[in-house]
Image (tube, helix red, strand yellow):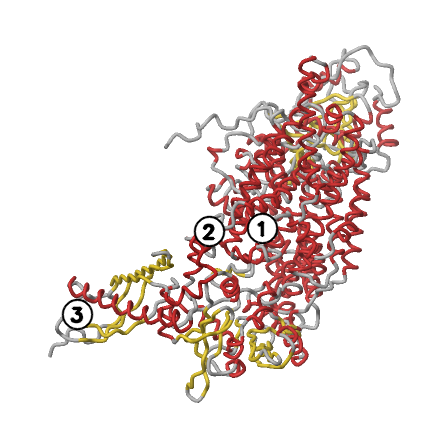
């Protein structure tokens, strides 16, 4: 729509009810009384072209979705100051206006009322000329946009600070800036019977496997929903293993991440109105990867990854192991520790399992309470949580001090792997219940169950654990470790890319 | 529905199948200090049968398992064999479940009824078997990495306690105890690998069966040899066979600056996870065999009743840890020799004959096998 | 189909969890941790003594208070159970540090007392074993160690510091099990006695009880234990004050510290009879020379010191060997076991009559001593007026 598009000139079609009539009066009637009846946000600005042959025209736009100065300067002013030659008839009028008069950068022709309806909501101006059965659409989008800022959910120390905003066009441009190759392709789809949301599928033509792109497109096309207000809708509607709590589609607010994923041979989906891009297929390892891993020194990055894996284990397993140890296997705790835990629990009225679940719940309440509040109030909540609930509860012997440590550790470790934090709660709770029933062995049964679940999952035909269940060295290079860039010669095998070569030989390094 | 397991995952599945459940038992205890010799002997003795199995699978390359099997043996013999092996695999699943539940009862939860633990295990393996061999192989790799890492750590920590003198004198009582130990090891766990024969549906290439069975078996043999010898050298050759769970006992002695201590639970956990692979594979094999024997193409509906049967069977075949020891370490029943040695060799002979005939006649059957 | 099964599975598992009922669930605060256990008498009835600790004080100020309880019972385990009743809390064994036996128990055979410890799932194999000398187990547990909270912790700390304390060989119960099981080795156990220290009785670990089979046959004192330590290849930084001849200046007491020892015992067959060759190499550090006018840069003096050390230790080893061979006839060095391992053919021949051969087993002895450290200076302080 940013380019000229000529409607196909052919034999005059038989006029239908939806077709724009040459009569301006009829058109206005239809629009005002039928399509936009009772809609007061639609503005109709009537004007006439100048002498010698003034013609009645109407500029229609949706209030506040257009740039008003733009419309008046580049559409209204030229139209009102120039005249349309008398010999022009029908469609020629519109073409003449677009070619010779209008100074806006985009102009399109439409012939149906329904299209006018659709277009207006995109923030354009529609010009109807009396006697012309074609409407001219001029671009003048001008609704309130958020600036490109650093995404709050994925801030970095080292790395680009641009994040997606709600505008699809801006978002695509942010990715395109990073992949200025003609192979970078974008496919547009419209989803939502009411919202008509634009959805873009991004991929690299010479890398991404076409089956994957087709599959993504097929699944998105199959969506039949009234509105898509965020990419979360699409995510849930097209993902594999919908009953599993683990995500099988990645989400990010960062254009650099999208670019990186697309370069690996993945497909990204951007949704208008949502700053969250979706990437697919998504594997479990990706939850433990961060974009900074690739910007920092590879040893640091590997270490941080290790920390993430450990943190995920800590956040999911600590309470369960604690319960298993104190309730079933005190013989496995070092003697000094068992004595102090025993002493700490002496006056606590609740059994260990109740303590764990209650404190876990308290932590979740504090977190949920703080998360949507403005920052100052959020801090107040954490202070109340930490001092009043934590310290006072221990002093009052309502909970034991080791339990506070366990819950605190669990909570903090959870934030290290943010994309899995929500489901970590679920895993933790189920493991705690199992540990309370059968001790460490219950815990192990839980772990087996989750591993089975993970093993059985797939994301767009790729096994969810792909890189973790391989023994091929090349595929292990970007998992728990992040090997140096000069060694990541090939793209991941599981994505079945067309072109697996990433680095040309060892060209990345010459000094050795 | 073709289920194709990548070679390396299949290899780990074989490895975990052999190592998983065996870890804590006094394998080859009859051999005394010559346990390593018994292991080597058993490995050499088991190799022909492992190779025969791989050879048969290799000859069947191109068709899914039961199709190829039927071509070799004919319809009714293969169905009868499948039925028998289904029973064998199911009983194996029962054994493994009772091994684990009795282990847990002995070392950790004395008053919890083992049947509860068996129920948990049965539910989990039911799920695993329904997911099929592909998922199971992936699971085995995930778990295998953890298990092998734990074993490596334990091995390193145990090294300071090892007394190499425990392996002396070599062959004090002659070669007979070594052979007896070797037969113990052959029977459990080495030749239980025959169950795996029925699990893989098809392989990627003609060499794949070798790549799966041979390294898997050899690696498992090595891992077990190391673990068993280490624990024998720690607990003492005289005491080794007397403990129900010598590795458990050995690991209990690890004490690194009073901090890295009381690590037995790790062994217990590893054992439980490793055993799970074995029982799930056995259940899967049993389900596949029974479904085929009765002429069904999909095995999944048989899994649930069989798994429920395992709960009962695990308490029926073996009720206490005393009998676990008997079954795992001592028995050599004729049916085991039949299932683990005779039938695989006979099947191999038939497969070779068939292949030779096929080649001689240039029949379309054999040719058809090559394509896929 | 698959989803339904998943849901069913989850429900079944949940039911399982709820029905599981947590048979083995315990609350940690209801446990009374047994730190030490002991047996004072086996016949006619067992007298079982437990040292338990009582924890109290909650989070910030955990306090541990030892209590000693004793009862008579039909066996060790039933005695423990009976004491749970007395204490009102569940006696929890896996954190026990020490297991004590009185001399009487040791003389009558330790198997009665030790068997439970070896078998039990509850008591760990790493428990230290001791024999009390000239006192009962109960008296030891009731004594007051100066630093540690409880006697058991005190004994545990001493056992862990054996390298620096010397005078005994610590033994964990699993090592005892092995020694009892193996052919051709007699177990030795460290002994505890009580000493008076500012009006309080304090337990001291020193010396060794020598067993033959499972019966105690005699004591070794602290010095003999040091030598035994060296011969068993157990490293200890023992301090030895030895009157050393320094040139023509006479004899001076010099303190040596062992910094390394290697022992090699070779079983031999000589003239159709078993024999053994012991080769002991020791590295010494010189700690204190006092007034001795000795300069270790002078190789002659150093050589003379090394020779004197070798003679000294040779004599002491001979004395010890005589004691264990002739007086006790207990193969504490495990020479028989070495025979079995290194010379299996010979052992097949001698093994059954080891008791007969051992008392007059000829032992060749080679002791080499090296001075490797002399602190920061080679000569003593020179005093001038």
Disc 3: CA contacts within 10 A as few (<14), some (14-19) or many (>=20): many
Q: Badge 3 is on which residue?
A: C294
Q: Badge 1 is on which residue?
A: B30
The numbered disc on residue B169 is: 2
Q: Percent from the top left, x then y, of residue B26?
A: 59, 52
Compared to residue A46, the image places residue B150 above or below, namely below
Disc 1: CA contacts within 10 A as few (<14), some (14-19) or many (>=20): many
For the residues beneath circles 3 and 1, the answer to whether they share a chain is no
Left or right of C371, for residue A437: right
Q: Quadrant of the C terminus of chain A?
A: top left
> Which residue: 15% across, 75% down?
C250
Judging depth in this view, the residue of C202 and B173 nearest the camera is B173
Left or right of C68, for residue A222: right
Q: Which chain does tag 2 point to? A: B
For the residues beneath circles 1 and 2, the answer to whether they share a chain is yes
Label 1 vs 2, first from the N-terminus: 1
Judging depth in this view, the residue of C320 and B148 nearest the camera is C320
> Which residue: 79% across, 26% down?
B75
Element class at badge 1 = helix
Compared to residue C247, the image places residue A109 above or below, namely above
Q: Percent from the top left, x then y, of residue B271?
A: 63, 51
Q: Which chain does tag 3 point to? A: C
Q: Nearer the viewer, mark 3 or mark 2?
A: 2
The residue most toward the left is C385
The residue most toward the bottom is C199
Q: Percent from the top left, x then y, of residue A224?
A: 81, 34
Element class at badge 3 = loop
């Amino acid at each position: 729509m940013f380019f000229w598009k000529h409607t196909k000139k052919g034999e005059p079609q038989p006029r239908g009810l939806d077709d724009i009539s040459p009569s301006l009066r009829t058109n206005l009637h239809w629009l005002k009384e039928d399509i936009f009846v009772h809609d007061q946000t639609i503005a109709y600005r009537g004007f006439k072209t100048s002498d010698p042959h003034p013609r009645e025209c109407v500029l229609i736009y949706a209030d506040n979705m257009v740039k008003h100065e733009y419309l008046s300067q580049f559409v209204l002013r030229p139209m009102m100051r120039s005249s349309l030659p008398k010999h022009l008839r029908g469609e020629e009028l519109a073409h003449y206006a677009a070619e010779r008069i209008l100074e806006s950068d985009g102009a399109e022709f439409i012939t149906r009322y329904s299209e006018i309806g659709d277009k207006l909501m995109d923030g354009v101006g529609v010009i109807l000329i009396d006697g012309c059965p074609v409407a001219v659409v001029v671009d003048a989008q001008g609704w309130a946009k958020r600036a490109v800022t650093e995404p709050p959910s994925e801030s970095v120390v080292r790395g680009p600070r641009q994040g997606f905003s709600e505008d699809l066009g801006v978002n695509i441009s942010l990715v395109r800036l990073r992949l200025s190759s003609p192979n970078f392709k974008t496919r547009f789809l419209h989803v939502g019977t009411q919202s008509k949301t634009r959805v873009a599928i991004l991929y690299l033509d010479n890398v991404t496997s076409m089956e994957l792109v087709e599959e993504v497109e097929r699944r998105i096309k199959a969506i039949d929903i009234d509105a898509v207000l965020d990419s979360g809708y699409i995510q849930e509607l097209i993902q594999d293993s919908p009953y599993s709590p683990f995500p099988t589609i990645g989400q990010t607010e960062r254009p650099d991440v999208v670019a990186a994923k697309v370069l690996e041979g993945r497909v990204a989906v951007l949704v208008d109105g949502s700053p969250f891009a979706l990437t697919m297929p998504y594997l479990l390892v990706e939850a433990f990867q961060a974009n900074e891993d690739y910007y920092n020194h590879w040893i640091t990055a590997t270490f941080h990854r290790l920390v993430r894996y450990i943190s995920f284990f800590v956040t999911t397993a600590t309470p369960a192991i604690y319960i298993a140890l104190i309730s079933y296997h005190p013989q496995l705790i070092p003697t000094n520790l068992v004595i102090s835990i025993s002493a700490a629990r002496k006056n606590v009225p609740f059994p260990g399992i109740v303590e764990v679940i209650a404190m876990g719940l308290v932590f979740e309440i504090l977190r949920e309470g703080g998360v949507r509040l403005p920052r100052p109030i959020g801090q107040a909540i954490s202070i109340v949580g930490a001092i009043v609930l934590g310290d006072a509860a221990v002093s009052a012997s309502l909970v034991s001090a080791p339990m506070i440590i366990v819950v605190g550790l669990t909570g903090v470790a959870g934030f290290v792997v943010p994309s899995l934090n929500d489901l970590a709660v679920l895993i933790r709770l189920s493991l705690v219940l199992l540990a309370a029933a059968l001790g460490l062995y219950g815990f192990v049964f839980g772990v087996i169950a989750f591993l089975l679940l993970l093993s059985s999952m797939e994301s767009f035909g790729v096994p969810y654990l792909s890189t973790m269940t391989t023994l091929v060295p090349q595929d292990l290079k970007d998992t728990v470790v992040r090997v140096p860039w000069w060694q990541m010669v090939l793209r991941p095998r599981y994505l079945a890319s067309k072109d697996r070569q990433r680095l040309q030989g060892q060209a990345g390094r010459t000094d050795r | 529905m073709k289920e194709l397991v990548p070679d390396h995952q299949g290899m780990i599945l074989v490895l975990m199948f052999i190592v998983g459940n065996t870890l804590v038992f006094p394998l080859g205890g009859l051999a005394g200090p010559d346990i390593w010799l018994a292991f080597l002997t058993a490995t050499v003795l088991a190799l022909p049968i492992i190779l025969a199995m791989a050879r048969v699978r290799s000859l069947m390359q191109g068709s899914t398992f039961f199709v190829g099997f039927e071509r070799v043996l004919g319809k009714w013999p293969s169905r009868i064999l499948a039925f028998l092996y289904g029973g064998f695999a199911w009983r194996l699943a029962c054994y493994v479940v009772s091994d684990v539940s009795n282990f847990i009862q002995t070392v950790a939860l004395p008053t919890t009824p083992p049947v509860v633990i068996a129920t948990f295990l049965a539910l989990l393996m039911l799920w695993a078997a329904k997911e099929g061999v592909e998922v199971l192989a992936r699971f085995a790799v995930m778990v295998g990495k953890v298990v092998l890492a734990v074993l490596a750590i334990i091995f390193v920590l145990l090294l300071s306690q090892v007394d190499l003198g425990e392996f002396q004198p070599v062959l004090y009582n002659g070669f007979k105890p070594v052979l007896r130990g070797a037969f113990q090891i052959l029977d459990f766990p080495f030749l239980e690998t025959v169950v795996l024969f029925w699990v893989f549906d098809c392989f990627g290439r003609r060499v794949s069966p070798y790549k799966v069975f041979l390294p898997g078996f050899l690696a498992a043999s090595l891992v077990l040899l190391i673990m068993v010898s280490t624990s024998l050298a720690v607990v003492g050759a005289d005491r080794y066979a007397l403990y129900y769970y010598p590795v458990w006992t050995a690991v209990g002695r690890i004490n690194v600056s009073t901090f890295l201590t009381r690590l037995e639970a790790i062994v217990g956990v590893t054992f439980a996870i490793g055993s799970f692979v074995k029982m799930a594979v056995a259940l899967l094999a049993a389900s596949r065999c029974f479904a085929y024997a009765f002429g069904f193409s999909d095995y999944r509906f048989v899994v649930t009743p069989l798994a429920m049967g395992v709960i009962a069977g695990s308490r029926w075949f073996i009720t206490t840890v005393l009998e676990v020891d008997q079954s795992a370490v001592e028995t050599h029943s004729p049916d085991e020799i039949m299932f683990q040695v005779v039938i695989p060799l006979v099947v191999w002979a038939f497969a070779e004959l068939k292949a030779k005939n096929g080649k001689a006649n240039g029949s379309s059957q054999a040719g058809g096998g090559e394509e896929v | 189909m698959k989803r339904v099964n998943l849901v069913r599975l989850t429900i079944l598992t949940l039911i399982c969890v709820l029905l599981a009922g947590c048979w083995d669930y315990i609350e940690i605060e209801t446990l009374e941790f047994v730190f030490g256990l002991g047996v004072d008498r086996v016949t006619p009835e067992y007298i079982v003594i437990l040292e338990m600790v009582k924890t109290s004080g909650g989070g910030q100020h955990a306090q541990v208070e030892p209590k000693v309880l004793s009862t008579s019972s039909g066996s060790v385990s039933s005695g423990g159970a009976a004491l749970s009743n007395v204490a009102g809390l569940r006696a929890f064994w896996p954190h026990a540090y020490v297991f004590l036996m009185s001399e009487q128990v040791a003389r009558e055979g330790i198997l009665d007392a030790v068997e439970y410890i070896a078998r039990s799932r509850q008591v760990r194999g790493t428990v230290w074993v001791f024999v009390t000398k000239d006192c009962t187990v109960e008296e030891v547990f009731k004594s007051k160690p100066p630093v540690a909270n409880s006697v058991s912790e005190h004994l545990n700390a001493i056992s862990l510091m054996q390298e620096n304390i010397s005078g005994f060989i610590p033994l964990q119960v699993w090592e005892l099990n092995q020694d009892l099981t193996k052919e051709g080795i007699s177990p030795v156990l460290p002994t505890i006695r009580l000493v008076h220290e500012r009006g309080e009785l304090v337990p001291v670990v020193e010396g060794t009880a020598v067993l033959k089979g499972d019966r105690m046959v005699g004591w070794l004192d602290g010095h003999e234990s040091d030598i035994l330590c060296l011969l068993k290849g157990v490293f200890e930084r023992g301090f030895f004050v030895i009157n050393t001849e320094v040139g023509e200046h006479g004899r001076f007491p010099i303190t040596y510290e062992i910094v390394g020892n290697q022992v090699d015992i070779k079983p031999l067959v000589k003239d159709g009879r078993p024999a053994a060759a012991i080769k002991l190499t020791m590295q010494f550090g010189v700690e204190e020379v006092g007034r001795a006018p000795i300069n270790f840069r002078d190789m002659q003096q150093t050589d003379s010191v090394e020779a004197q050390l070798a003679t000294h230790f040779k004599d002491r080893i001979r004395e010890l060997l005589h004691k264990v061979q002739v007086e006790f006839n207990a193969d504490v060095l495990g020479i028989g076991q070495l025979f079995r391992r290194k010379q299996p053919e010979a052992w097949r021949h001698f093994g059954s009559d080891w008791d007969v051969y051992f008392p007059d087993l000829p032992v060749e002895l080679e002791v080499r001593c090296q001075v490797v450290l002399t602190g920061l200076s080679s000569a003593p302080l020179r005093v001038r007026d």
